Amino acid sequence: MARIQYLIDTNAIVDYLGLKLPNSGMVFMNSIMDNEPSASVITKIEVLGYSTTAEYSRLLAEFIDDINIIELTSEVVSKTILIRRTNKIKLPDAIIAATAVVRGSVIISRNVKDFQNIKGLKAINPWEK
C-alpha cells in the first residue's frame, strides 16, 4: 500500500508552529512531520512573507528549510490554468491545488472549502482531526 503524500497549506503551517491546533490536530501534524512533509513554492512565499516577531519568523524559516518545497513545473502551470478556468479560486490556491493534483497529494488546510470542488483533489482540515 502506497504512503499518502501530503501538501501543507500556509494556514496549517502557521497554526501548527503557533501551537494553535487542538491536540488531535497537533498529533496528526506531528505524524506528517515524521514523513517528509511538502509544501508548494507558493506556500513558501506566503509563510516567509508572514509579518511577525523575529523569533517566530526564524521558526517559520527553519521549518521551510526542513521540508520539501515543490517548485512550479510546466505540468503544474497547465493544471493551474485548467483549475482557474473551471473553478472560482484565487491564483495562489489554484497553484497549491494544481501542485497537489499533479503529485497525487492530499492538501492539509484549514480552508478545505477552497479546494472542495476541484476534481481529483482531497483536502484535510487539521482542526477537525
Image (tube, rainbow, N blue to C red):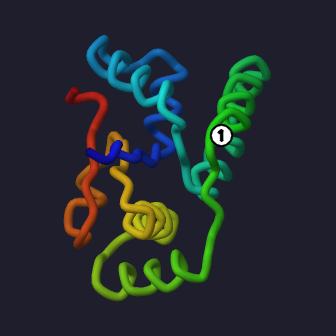
Q: Quadrant of the N terminus?
A: top left
Figure quadrant of residue 119: bottom left
Graded by Cα atoms within 10 Å as few (under 14), some (14 to 19) or many (20 or more), the crowding at tag 1 reads some
* Residue 6 spot, x, y in % from top left: 41, 45
Is 105 rendered above or below residue 30?
A: below
- Label 1 residue SS: loop
Q: Which residue is mark 1?
A: 50
Q: Nearer the viewer, residue 127 or 90?
A: 127
Disc 1 marks which amino acid?
Tyr
Q: Quadrant of the C terminus?
A: top left
Relative depth, front residue between 5 and 40: 5
Q: Residue at x 33, y 40 (%)?
A: 110
Point 31% across, 22% down: residue:
25
Q: Residue at x 63, y 57 (%)?
A: 41
- x and y percentages locating residue 111 in the rendered image: 32, 47
Q: Residue furthest top?
A: 23
Q: In the rendered image of this protein, does residue 116 appear above or below residue 39? A: below
Identified at 43% across, 30% down, the residue is 32
How many marks are shown on the rendered structure? 1
Where 12 falls versus 103 (above or below)?
Answer: above
Where does residue 98 sit, x and y in percent of width and height?
Answer: 43, 70
The picture places residue 54, in percent across and down from the top left corner, at 79, 22
Foreground residue, 18 or 78?
78
Left or right of residue 68, residue 30 in this image: left
Look at the picture and state if 31 lies above or below 48.
above
Q: Quadrant of residue 70?
A: bottom right
